[in-house]
Image (tube, rainbow, N blue to C red):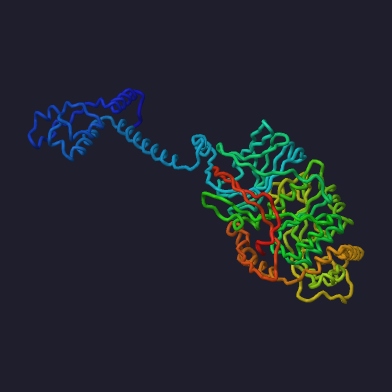
Amino acid sequence: MAIVSSDLPIIISFIWKILYSEGVSLHPPASEPDNEGNGDELKRYKHVQYSPFSSCYSKMSPVLPSNHRNHKNICYSFQLFLWSFRNRTHLLIFSIVAVILLFCTVYLYTKVIDIPFRNMNFTEYIIDAISDRIRFNHTHAYITSAYYFKNSKSLGKNAVAMVVVMSQKTLLNLEKYEMTLIGTNGNNSLKSQASIKIETAEGMSCEYVMVFVQAQTLSNPQKLEIESLGTRVQIPFREPRESAHSPVIICISPQFVAEKWQVFLMNIHIVRRYGGHMHIYITSMVRELFESLKVYESMGIVTLDYWIRMKFKETKTPYADPMRNVEWRNQAGAQTDCLLQYKEFQEVADFIAFFDIDDILIPRLSHNYHQEFSNHFNAYPDYHSIFYNKRDIAVERVSNVKDFSFRQMFSTMEIREEEGYGKSIVNPLKYNSTWIHHSFQLPRDKMLKIYNTEIIHVKDILENELNQSAPFRLPKMFGSDTDTLIGEMDLRSLDIDFQRVFGKNKYREAATKMEDKNFYGPIVFDCYNESFYHPYFVEKKNFKELCPNADNCKLPQRDDIKCIHSDAEYVSGPEMYPITFHCAIGSFWSENIGCYQ
């Protein structure tokens, strides 16, 4: 029955009497039996002022008859209480609702005071959560890198860009999370809201995903912090590079237990031949190869960068291992970090490519990368990237670096029918973040697909030794009898360049120690096949059913194989809600970890 306005005075009066124990006059039915013959006392009892709370004192009441001061008195009092609502059903409904609300309030209060996060405006949180249908869970995040851009054409003035790995369990739509960033310079500070963009395949089942975080702050900040509900954590940051060895940067995905020096030498010299500069991320690498690459770095031919294993130094709540629950060891994070390093107002790099070490691009329409890429972008100025497909190849094995020869490797090269999903070359002025193959934050119809040139993917190094006496021949493009993959003059220039580097004492001393043991390659291949390739391509499982990750690979350690491993000092911020942040500082190369991912 609905409560009408005429009932309000009665309701208010009733509640007032209950709260202040004034009582409500009750008149039990005239036919109430008097089992013990206490007629006079019952008459007095009929005129007693009674409230629902007075039943608590019924046992000690001198007014009530003795037969009503026993354990049955509570039931009898409850009957009287219900009788008072006999002709006022709406009051009964109202009272029941009030009692339910009271219990719900008490229950919610007990839950709120158990929350381990203090200084939180819980009322505002609840309202926002209901209105936006957002439910937060306490999770952890790892800050890979953060950069401050004083003046960026694509990011704006005083921009902050961060590469962060966050848990998708934080809330249903991670991009709706409002991260608060505070920049401080002396006595001045600026609080701003950061945007979050996810770079991963749709429906990815991995708990952790790489996100690109962007915000504006004050000029020349001395300190950057993330704030949540009154708690702050300071984040390390740096400025992007002010110069580059080349306007074309080839970003190489993170290497672990890398040992195929033959592929490294092929790609390094080809990139150098066509005017690019290779930026290589390293998690771990056999020592002899690493020392050879350090010589290349000292000559300005390559840049070696740390790719630190993600760890949470200190936590107070359970969490999943981010390395085992993120797509391919956060490869998208490394490529986005590389993009940000060379992204500046002064156009440090004109073009940035995202390759694996076994992805080799030979330009066919021009003599160098810059001219080739410029021709494509000039023809389609609105496009943000160009995309090359991949073609599998196989080369013969070179056991001794002294026998390394581009002429002979290309003469005996196998061009195979198998293709692979390609890679992108981007305009950094139009690209802020990326996935492994391309960005999910930009329209795919503005990605120019190239069909007359392919990336050659060194899928296999054959068991047979490189035939130094094989007749010279130029490999042909797949499906063509006339179009060659590379020119003879280019092969001659590549061999001359390698011999020039090999002639340097420091390089020759390091390179001649490299051996082709091919120990970790087959182990990693089998692990990849078992954990992803077979389930994906054979069993037809999709990203909603599996997380592409091979961090659980068992990598045996050998006394005759030593690795250099990237390492750092790990830092955990204070416990924050809903996300606690972690990072690493002071990166360095370590010889004491072993050969691991």
Question: Residue 435 location in percent, x, y?
Answer: 69, 52
Query: Can you see residue 396?
Result: no
Q: Position of residue 413 (x, y in %)?
A: 82, 70
The C terminus: image quadrant: bottom right
Residue 57 sits in quarter? top left
Vertically, is 450 above or below 403? above
Picture residue at 75% right of the left edge, 67% below the top: 260
Q: Is residue 32 above or below residue 511?
A: above
Residue 575 in sight in this render:
yes
Give the left or right position of residue 363, taking residue 163 as reference: right
In-image side of 118 versus 105 (left or right): right
Picture mark count: 0
User: Quick one: which residue is furthest to the right in this view?
Assistant: 489
Taking depth in this image into account, of 573 and 151 the one nearest to the observer is 573
Q: Residue at x 70, y 66 (%)?
A: 562
Q: Residue at x 84, y 49 (%)?
A: 247
Residue 452: x, y in percent? 83, 59
Q: Is residue 496 placed above or below 148 in the rendered structure?
A: below
